[in-house]
Amino acid sequence: MGIGIIDIQMADFRTVWQEALPKVREGVTGVGVWTALNAAVPLAAESGQFVLGLPRELGELSGHLRMALTKRLIETTVSEKFGEAYVLRVIDGTEDGDWELEKRRDAEKARLNEQAMNRMREEMASRTNWDTIYEQLGRQFAATPQRSLPQNRARFYEQAIEVVAEARRSITTWDDLQERNFARCIERLAQYAEAPSVLVAADVLKRSGEL
């Protein structure tokens, strides 16, 4: 074990900070950063984070600790003491409960971010699936010979109804976005077939077994 390195099994984050603080002070200048360092309270060393809390009335000093030079110096010194890498986290409050509150906020933020990502993935999948059907209807109509004739449009319509109904049957979970994209395809098919969209929707729903 190197000089100044505390056994990671025995290391206490408060002891680490006490030993690191003099070296950090040597590497910085300025009343503000010194005041922030002296007021900082070590709260935790977990999940690769070394957590320092500042009294709420001194919260404006947190910027001094987050400055690139100071932050890097703290991280380097603390990491040397622990024998593994840590990044600095500065929070408002100097009590254990303040860190617990911050962790709950982190968890809630992560949960909301995950929800947003899942919703985005679902929306992209839904949009992609129905966009494919939407474009397929356009290609199918363009390939219909003599489509100005009603009998040929009827043949196109019969085929297109099955395409949309099959897509409808393949979806097991429906939401508002799915319904809007489905309606968009109905409207396009109604335009090509020169038929009321409500009747087109009825034909699709019958074909898909919903009516």
Image: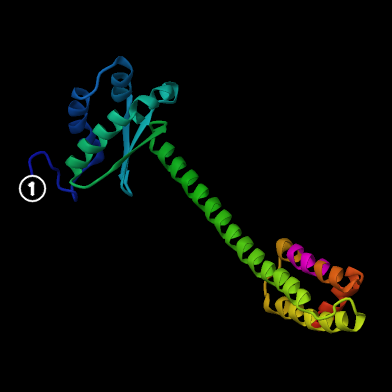
Question: Which residues are the magenta region?
Answer: 180-187
The verdict on residue 76 being magenta is no
- Per the image, label 1 sits on a secondary structure element best described as loop
Q: How far across and down, in percent of the image, does residue 133 sit?
A: 70, 72
Residue picked out by circle 1:
1
Query: In the picture shown, does residue 102 fall above or below 174?
Result: above
Q: Residue at x 77, y 82 (%)?
A: 162
Residue 208 can be seen, yes or no:
no
Q: How far across and down, in percent of the image, does residue 43 sit?
A: 33, 37
Place residue 177 in its image quadrant: bottom right
Residue 64 can be seen, yes or no:
yes
Name, please, the residue furthest toward the front.
146
Horizontal arrangement in the rendering, residue 97 relative to residue 72 (left or right): right
Q: Residue at x 90, y 80 (%)?
A: 149
Place residue 123 in its image quadrant: bottom right
Name, please, the residue furthest toward the top.
31
Place residue 4 in its image quadrant: top left
Q: 191 and 36: which one is in front?
A: 191
Q: Residue at x 92, y 69 (%)?
A: 196
Q: How far across and down, in percent of the image, does residue 98 sit?
A: 43, 36
Horizontal arrangement in the rendering, residue 84 relative to residue 3 (left or right): right
Quarter that holds the C terminus: bottom right
Query: How is the rendered protein coloured?
Result: rainbow
